[in-house]
Amino acid sequence: MKNIEMFVVSHKDLFLKIPENYKVIGVGKYGMDNRENILSDCTGDNISKKNLNYCELTAIYWLWKNYDLPNYIGICHYRRFFVDGITSKIFETKKIERIMEDYDAILPKKVKEKPDVWTYFANSISGKEKDLIILENLIKNEYNDYFQAFEDVMHSQSASFCNMAVMKKDDFNKYCKWLFELLEKYESLVDLKGYSKQEQRIYGFMSEFLLNVWMKKENKNIKYVNSMLFTENKFKNFLKKIKVFMKGIFYND
């Protein structure tokens, strides 16, 4: 068994060259095309049909239920990766292993949101405050041990987004068990009637907050690193690299 593998969740062909020990896992219709050299979220025990609402979570669920997991599991996206703060080079797995010797998890650097994370989501094009209230009540009533962590995260001014992480195998399994059980209950309480396509991605969005909640409640020692959204436009990538470089110099968390 390999010590570490990074999984790139994608709904289309990659335009980037990815490092060794990075594997593509196709989701949605892309995952159904039986393409060579990629994993698929639609085989075995899966929730692939929920991809519209669960986003990258259908890949995470598939890995949890079907894959022979290595000691360290990393999740990134077809155009968003963990990168070096100086060179903007995608992390090699050897670098990730070195970090994980001293930490429980790796997450993207937190994004600052004012006045707080709750208000940011409630006022965005992606969410509705009523759904946050439903989630809050569910956690308060059925996952009360996590309620204070939920309140702390949602009423803070920063959080780690994008459902990107590197975790130890045991933590990954524990997190997935907690997350998907919670989301199944949450799904039964939410009415998506009249929601836009963006708003229908609700469970994927909510899980971004929930990853922060789980990490906080479980008191995990987290290394926050730079991430970068790549595009096929080389000039735009150059500008993004400058931004990442500046963040690497001035960001403190």
Image (spheres, grey):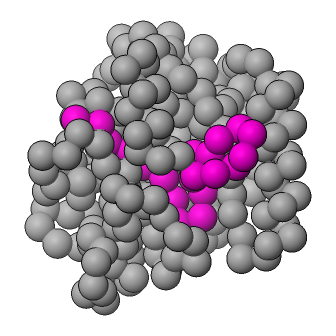
Number of numbered discs visible in the structure rendering? 0
129 to the left or right of 99: right
Name the spot of residue 28 as percent of width and height, x first.
38, 76
Vertical order, 9 against 190 (above or below):
below
Vertical order, 45 against 15 (above or below):
above
39 to the left or right of 215: left
The residue sitting at 75% across, 57% down in the picture is 125
219 to the left or right of 77: left
Name the spot of residue 217 as percent of width and height, x first.
42, 14
100 magenta-colored: no
Name the spot of residue 149 as percent of width and height, x first.
50, 14
The answer to whether residue 46 of the structure is visible from this angle is yes
241 to the left or right of 26: right
The answer to whether residue 127 of the structure is visible from this angle is no
The residue sitting at 86% across, 70% down in the picture is 235
Vertical order, 151 against 108 (above or below):
above
Q: Quadrant of residue 32?
A: bottom left
73 magenta-colored: yes
Q: Quadrant of residue 16?
A: bottom right
Q: Quadrant of residue 160?
A: top right
**171 or 155, which is in the foreground?**
171
**35 or 199, which is in the foreground?**
35
Name the spot of residue 36 as percent of width and height, x first.
27, 84
The residue sitting at 74% across, 39% down in the picture is 86
Q: Which residues are magenta?
A: 71-90
The residue sitting at 41% across, 44% down in the picture is 93
Quarter of the C terminus within the rendering: top right
**128 or 39, which is in the foreground?**
39
